[in-house]
Amino acid sequence: MENPGSSEVIRNAVQKGNSDPKPRLGMTIEMALLINTCTDMTTDDLLFMNPREGKNISCKYSPEKLRPVIAMTVTSDNNIYLMTEDSESNDQLSMLKYNHAGNEWEHAGMSSVSRLLGPDDYWSCDTKNLVEVDQVLYYLSMGERRGSESQLVYLTKYDRDTDQWQQCSQLQVDESETYCAALSCGSHIYFLTTFEVHRYDPSQDRWCSRSPLTNIMDVCTAVAMGTEIFCTDVEFSQTMVYSTESDSWQELRGSPIPGHLDVHPDDAPKLFILANQLHIHFKVYDYVEEEFSVDTQILVYDRSADAWGDLKGTLPGDTFVPRGSMCPVAHMYLPYLGA
């Protein structure tokens, strides 16, 4: 009897017409995805990283395809999508889908979507997220009215039957926010700011307010694990966990960064989940006689001890950063990556 997890069976599946067979989870390793951003924000390589296993695999791709990456997500069925600037118009965004077996990015066969979905008197903020709920992709962007503190969150979903992006209910944000986070948890989408928390119900196309954050400013990253949402601020000074079942917040241990180090201001911390444990990726800089050095750090949270611990081992270079409200994680088959 053939082993369904063997590389020979996988090759046979490719030959029989399945151009992207997804290996079973037992054959894979969880890896976080980071993008190599240069000064012009273009890239031609990505990093697949598992610091717990000491794995850092960098893969180069066609720079014509990986134009400036706007957003990235990994779906519940382990599909990886990149949203990039359209090759014909910077006002339009195109979708790429990762081919696991070929280790390449292909056009997802989806229509493009406008970078800013709102009225003409709103300008686009940096906030752009791609999330999935029940195998439906949603694109979320924020716009600010010119000359006003008012902000709107625009949400649109992709309809596979019509190959169109359909506008969903908009969300008014009372305070102008530089930092925020958007993510899916269960069958809902959550949008977090310093002063507000909102939940979107796709079945009703409606936003509703939830209990706001306390004792934390400039929330910049959030990630879901089960029915809980973890988040932290741009300085990684305070970590909070939210129960979606009880609509309540709990304060966790903050950053263990020594006082002489600061989180790098240009690359906000990003949370991610590996092996059902909370991790964080960030950069710190240390001033020494009017000069400073930059160092990448990855910490893991031990909930039983309410403490962050350092992950020893080789870490990615300073040019690799996550894209979005969190660092996306996918199940990868190492032979496909040439490892």
Image (tube, grey):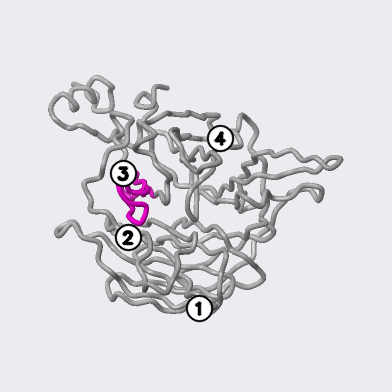
Kindly state the secondary structure of the residue where label 3 is placed.
Answer: strand
Q: Which residue appears at 28% of the width and 63% of the height? A: 157
Kindly state the secondary structure of the residue where label 4 is placed.
Answer: loop
> Label 4: which residue?
51
Q: Is residue 89 left or right of residue 181?
A: left
Q: Which residue appears at 28% of the width and 76% of the height? A: 204
Identity of the amino acid at label 1?
Ser
Identity of the amino acid at label 3?
Leu
Q: Residues within 10 Å of mark 4 (few under 14, many from 20)?
A: many
Marks 1 and 4: CB-CB under 8 Å? no
Marks 3 and 1: CB-CB under 8 Å? no
> Label 3: which residue?
96
Residue span colored magenta? 73-96
Identity of the amino acid at label 2?
Ser
**Residue 296 x, y percent position in the rendering:** 64, 39
Q: Please identify, in this view, whether the residue under mark 3 or under mark 2 is nearer the observer.
A: 2
Quadrant assignment, res 314: top right
Q: Nearer the viewer, residue 332 or 119?
A: 119
Measured in 3D between alpha carbons, the distance from the residue under mark 3 to the one under mark 1, in whole angstroms, is 32 Å
> Label 1: which residue?
150
Marks 1 and 2: CB-CB under 8 Å? no
